[in-house]
Amino acid sequence: MKKLFMFLAIAGVFAACKPEEIETAFEVRPAQATIEVSVVDVNTLQAAEGYTLTASAGTVNGNTVTLEGNKALAETTVTLTVAYKGADYSGQVKVNALRAGGNASYATTIVVGSPVSDKEITLKYGDAVESADKFYLNPDVNGHYGNTTAHYSHNGIDTWVQNLTEFMLTGECDYTIMSGTKIDAASVTYADTDYKNIVDSYAKVLNNYSEEPAKYEFTVSAWAYYTVEQTALYSDYVISVLADGVVVGEIPARNVATTMEYIEIANPLGHGHYHYGHGAHGDNANAGGGIVYGE
């Protein structure tokens, strides 16, 4: 079921100012991506304890790996390694490029331990097919201070908002973080039913999809057209369960990640006044609109 992505409010937050303080600037924060890592023991089907998690990029704090860009964040693949009971288990997460100020949320599960079996049980991940859905700000047409027209089409986006003032604006979005792996138990197949319980165990522990509420904050330059873009990133693949190298079951899976990015361009009606990251103080308030997923 598709969720509502609600744009809460845009509000001018600057107090009235002295003439010499009219021009001011703000610094866009670096892009940040997080990877939430679940470590699960396939024998107990519970979260493992006493392991060590390391990552090839970013910083590790508990089960969270954080990557921060030098303003923008370049695309990278992060290798995650879990040391558990004398053995190493690894997985990879592709982190997509992200604009400065953007947020991205990823989640993955690393399965540790070996199922009780007379054969060696391993997993093989098939090639992924990637796709994405994008959603944009759909503001209330009467809700934005200084906007002569609330919606503007440009570069394939139909809902740019206009800030036709010399004031900077601040805003925030309520949205839903969609992350993790979806597995439909009914789609799992078995080449050898003697291993059904083992295949089902992997299908259960790898199924970790979740939806969590979050907020995204941004600042709007004076004389800008602006929008907020949410991207749901999908990666579809098949996980094969092997016993001594022979496939005994297959688990179709979809991994989902979420990115949030603020985008602005120079307002063509700005008459050369637009300057990224700049604007005047003000005390003007603005109402919000909403971003809605199509049904």
Image: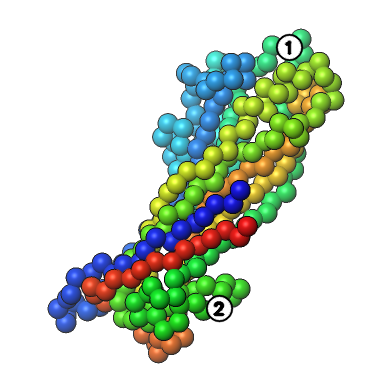
Q: Secondary structure at mark 2?
A: strand
User: Looking at the image, what colour scheme do you see?
Assistant: rainbow
Q: Considering the image in quadrants, where does the C terminus appear?
A: bottom right
Q: Residue at x 50, y 68 (%)?
A: 138
Which sits in the foreground, 8 or 97?
8
Given the image, on which type of amino acid does mark 2 rest?
Ser
Give the side of residue 5 with respect to residue 118, left or right.
Answer: left
Depth check, front residue: 48 or 190 = 190
The location of residue 143, given as percent across then percent down, is 38, 73
Q: Residue at x 46, y 53 (%)?
A: 175
Q: Amino acid at mark 1?
A: Ser
The quadrant holding residue 247 is: top right
Give the numbered dot on residue 153.
Answer: 2
Question: x, y (%) of residue 89?
Answer: 60, 26
Tag 1, which secondary structure?
loop
Q: Are marks 2 and 1 in contact (CB under 8 Å)?
A: no
- Residue drawn at x 46%, y 37% is 64
Residue 87 versus residue 117: which sits nearer the camera? 117
Taking the spot 68% from the left edge, 28% from the top edge, the residue there is: 203
**Is residue 75 shown to the viewer in this render?**
no
Question: Quadrant of residue 248 in the image?
Answer: top right
Q: Looking at this view, is 106 or 78 the one in front?
A: 106
Q: Which residue is mark 1?
A: 117
Q: Using the image, tell me which numbered label, if any, was put on residue 44.
A: none
* Whole-number angstrom distance, CA of label 2 to CA of label 1: 60 Å
Task: Check the image and report above or below for 196 versus 14.
Answer: above
